[in-house]
Image (spheres, coloured by chain):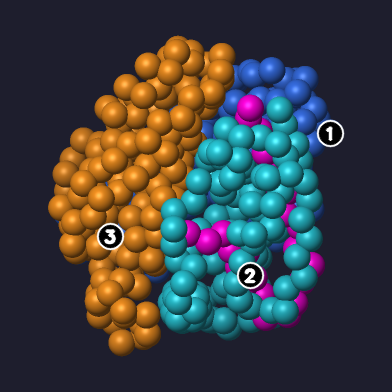
Chain colours: A orange, B blue, C cyan
Amino acid sequence: MLTQHELRVETNGRGTHDLSADIQSVVRRSGVTSGMCHVFIRHTSASLILCENADPAVMRDLETFMLRQAPDGDPMFTHTAEGPDDMPAHIRSILTQSDLNLPVRDGHCALGTWQGIYLWEHRHRGHRRTIVITVQGE
Amino acid sequence: MLTQHELRVETNGRGTHDLSADIQSVVRRSGVTSGMCHVFIRHTSASLILCENADPAVMRDLETFMLRQAPDGDPMFTHTAEGPDDMPAHIRSILTQSDLNLPVRDGHCALGTWQGIYLWEHRHRGHRRTIVITVQGE
Amino acid sequence: MLTQHELRVETNGRGTHDLSADIQSVVRRSGVTSGMCHVFIRHTSASLILCENADPAVMRDLETFMLRQAPDGDPMFTHTAEGPDDMPAHIRSILTQSDLNLPVRDGHCALGTWQGIYLWEHRHRGHRRTIVITVQGE
């Protein structure tokens, strides 16, 4: 059994969006009870992470960390066509994930208690992002 | 053909644990000769890596590197509920992998000669970690 | 339906190689119209990324960034058996991907407009790299 689904997310600029409920809902509706759920983002300036889902300070600290790793407007970057956050967005994407694969068990993704699935927008301006979800199994 | 298996690992605090033999054994017992093996860790402060399996200095250097990237107790972190290694553990998890997908060929994971599969505990205290292994194929 | 294919790439030293056309061709020949394409590199000093495929400055900036993160010959590294780029190559590999999973739709990988699939050689010397591609689906 294999189903594919497209999810569209409007972002409001840099920050994370919790996709956990949407993805669990796609898995539930797929009818797969045991198998895999694959989540893929079709962009190179937004990415996916599995992260602690309880304390909002975690997301703020992740932003602080990434801003230190790849500062907007750092003079080492030459790819600046779309502004000072253009190359940092690609780097944040490379350092995190464009695809996540999650085991499906008993009809839902077998996430740990503290794991949430997040889209991370790395551009300051809002974007329309497309995610492809593939569920396969029995 | 699809089988799922849960692996539990008791860690003794920060450091790596070689899971290669355990995972190859799960694949062998699954009866799948050609397909995929998916390894998933259900935590956000421990992660998975594929890494050089010969020289223990590699693991020590990885620790040194990560400690420089995200120092324990760095004042930039505000999420410190569980101590100075709490936020660095989430960052190390984000920068590495929560899931690995490995091709199965001739009844085992087709790893390169120098590739080992490691659980990387990022907390200083030991934890009981749960890993879900899904093997699918023919 | 499941097919596996091995791709060999001769690198000329540090830098990226666009694998997109080769991988799309393997998917097309597999006959799978809907499913998954998995790409796996059997090495720990070269890796895989999905990255912006239009401006060559992106790749140059990625090199600059990684060189700052893990400088060749940094005295913090003790694993130097194969030279000053040995440990930095393992770190670059850990921070990026050894495997990518891509959704197959209408007989090809459903990449975004700006996404290319790249092998990233992290050693200064050229190497022969082996990639295992598994396509499964309907």
Q: Is residue C10 above or below residue A63?
A: below
Q: Which residues are magenta?
A: C115-138
Q: Is residue A25 above or below residue A91?
A: above
Q: Residues within 10 Å of mark 3 (few under 14, many from 20)?
A: many
Q: Nearer the viewer, mark 1 or mark 3?
A: 3
- Residue at 44% x, 43% y is A40
Mark 1–mark 3 distance (CA, rounded to whole Å): 41 Å
- Residue at 78% x, 60% y is C8
Q: In this rendering, would B31 be left or right of B75?
A: right
Residue C122 belongs to the span the image colors magenta: yes
Q: Is residue A85 visible?
A: yes
Nearest the camera: C31 or C77?
Answer: C31
Q: In this rendering, would B27 be left or right of C54?
A: right
- Residue at 63% x, 30% y is C137
Residue B106's label in the rendered image is 1
Q: Main secondary structure of the magenta part?
A: strand
Q: Quadrant of the N terminus of chain B?
A: top right
Instruction: Name the kind of residue labelled 3 in the image.
Output: His
Q: Position of residue A104 (x, y in %)?
A: 48, 22
Q: In this rendering, would A85 be left or right of B30?
A: left
Which element carries disc 1, helix, strand or loop?
loop
**Residue on which the image places disc 3:** A122
Cβ atoms under marks 2 and 1 closer than 8 Å:
no
Which element carries disc 3, helix, strand or loop?
loop
**Residue on which the image places disc 2:** C17
- Residue at 63% x, 78% y is C14
Q: Quadrant of the C terminus of chain B?
A: top right
Task: Give the farthest residue toward the right.
Answer: B106
